[in-house]
Amino acid sequence: MLADVVFEQIEEEIDAAWQVLRDGLKSDNARTRIRAAAYIVRHTDAGRRRGFGRRGSSHDEPVEPQTVTLKWMDT
């Protein structure tokens, strides 16, 4: 029961955050619109699928293993 209350509160906060971004897209200030749009395309799955976002930050892409060699040196 407590977990349900916490989950619902988190969902409400996420909804509020998305509303802030939507409001930013409708702002009279061009810089605010650009920042809101940039955040959305960089931080959503839909934006990343279309090539936006930071390279190498996707957890869906497999990463090639790298060989690491450690060498102990006595001082």
Image: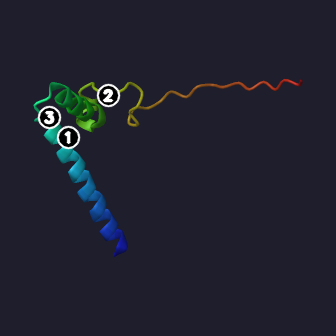
Q: Looking at the figure, which quarter contains the C terminus?
A: top right
Taking the image as shown, residue 28 lies to the left or right of residue 67, namely left
Q: How crowded is mark 1: few (under 14 residues within 10 Å), some or many (20 or more)?
A: some
Tell me what residue is drawn at x 82 percent, y 26 percent.
Answer: 72
Give the mark, 2 or 1, whose residue is nearer the N terminus: 1
Give the mark, 2 or 3, whose residue is nearer the N terminus: 3
Q: Quadrant of residue 27?
A: top left
Q: Which of 49 and 11 is in front in this view?
A: 11
Three-letter amino acid code at disc 2?
Gly
Q: What element carries label 2?
A: loop
Cα separation between marks 2 and 3? 18 Å
Taking the image as shown, residue 48 lies to the left or right of residue 29, namely right
Name the mark on residue 21. Answer: 1
Name the mark on residue 37. Answer: none
* Mark in the foreground, 2 or 1: 1
Tell me what residue is drawn at x 58 percent, y 25 percent.
Answer: 66
Q: Which of 66 and 38 is in front in this view?
A: 38
Q: Looking at the figure, which quarter contains the N terminus?
A: bottom left
Residue where numbered disc 2 is placed: 53
Q: In which quarter of the image is residue 4?
A: bottom left
Query: Mark 1 and 3 residues: CB-CB less than 8 Å, in contact?
Result: yes
Tell me what residue is drawn at x 30 percent, y 58 percent.
Answer: 10
Q: Compared to 73, does 45 lie above or below?
A: below
Q: What element carries label 3?
A: helix
Q: Residues within 10 Å of mark 2 (few under 14, many from 20)?
A: some
Residue where numbered disc 3 is placed: 25
Tell me what residue is drawn at x 17 percent, y 37 percent.
Answer: 24
Location of residue 51 in the rendering, given as x and y in whole percent from the top left corner: 27, 24
Q: Which of 60 and 37 is in front in this view?
A: 37
Q: Compared to 1, does 45 lie above or below?
A: above
Q: What element carries label 1?
A: helix
Three-letter amino acid code at disc 1?
Leu
